[in-house]
Image (cartoon, grey):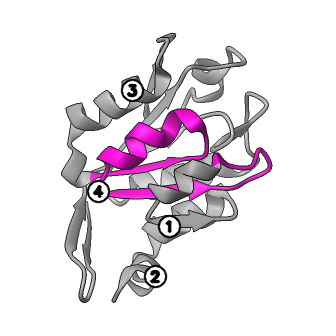
Amino acid sequence: MISLDIPGHRSIEINNVVFDFNGTIAEDGILIKDIEDKIKKLSYKDVHIFIITSDTYGSAMKQCEGLPAEVNVFNEEDVSEYKGKIIEKIGCNSTVAIGNGRNDFEMFKKSILAIDVIGKEGCFAKGLSEADIVVNNIFDAIDLLLKPDRIRATLRT
């Protein structure tokens, strides 16, 4: 668990981290170089890691083999709504959502902390309105969780 006491804001206990796949931890269906090591380091923080995707390229399961994460691949019509329901199921008040796309919007709204990743694919501009923090790349997003004082510094009032 990652515990944060954010001065003038709120206390947060993070038990779950949910990643989008394409555009967030993968580019064109392939895991971003060195992301596996970062995700493994994050797992040492005693958080449950989930990767949820509609898997545009059909590669998520193979690419995520060996990661300390539960991978959910789905073919729902309303992907955003489905991702939001996953956040509800595992716990809105203890889940961080990390993504970049339009279909991450609902999980951003439902999570205790939402991190929007710009990355090479860019990000859904309206997602910025639901994100708590916006970063340039996935490594910066994971480093926020590995070094939570960075979150504290960004969100304090």
* Cβ atoms under marks 1 and 3 closer than 8 Å: no
SS for tag 3?
helix
Left or right: 83 with respect to 95?
A: right
Q: Which residue is mark 3?
A: 81
Which image quadrant for residue 11? Answer: bottom left
Q: Residue at x 40, y 38 (%)?
A: 106
Pointer 4 residue: 112
Residue at image point 33% right, 89% down: 157
SS assignment at label 1:
strand
Q: Are marks 2 and 1 in contact (CB under 8 Å)?
A: yes
Quarter assignment of residue 63:
top right
Residue 70: image location, x then y, percent: 40, 29
N-term-proximal mark, 1 vs 3: 3
Q: Is residue 98 magenta?
A: yes
Q: Earlier in the sequence, mark 3 or mark 2?
A: 3
Q: CA distance from mark 4 to mark 3?
A: 17 Å
Is residue 116 magenta-colored? Answer: yes
Q: Which residue is mark 2?
A: 154
Q: How many numbered badges does the structure rendering display? A: 4
Q: Which region shows up in magenta?
A: 95-124
Q: Nearer the viewer, mark 1 or mark 3?
A: 3
Q: List the residue tagged with mark 1.
A: 133
Which amino acid, mark 2? Thr
Amino acid type at image mark 3: Glu
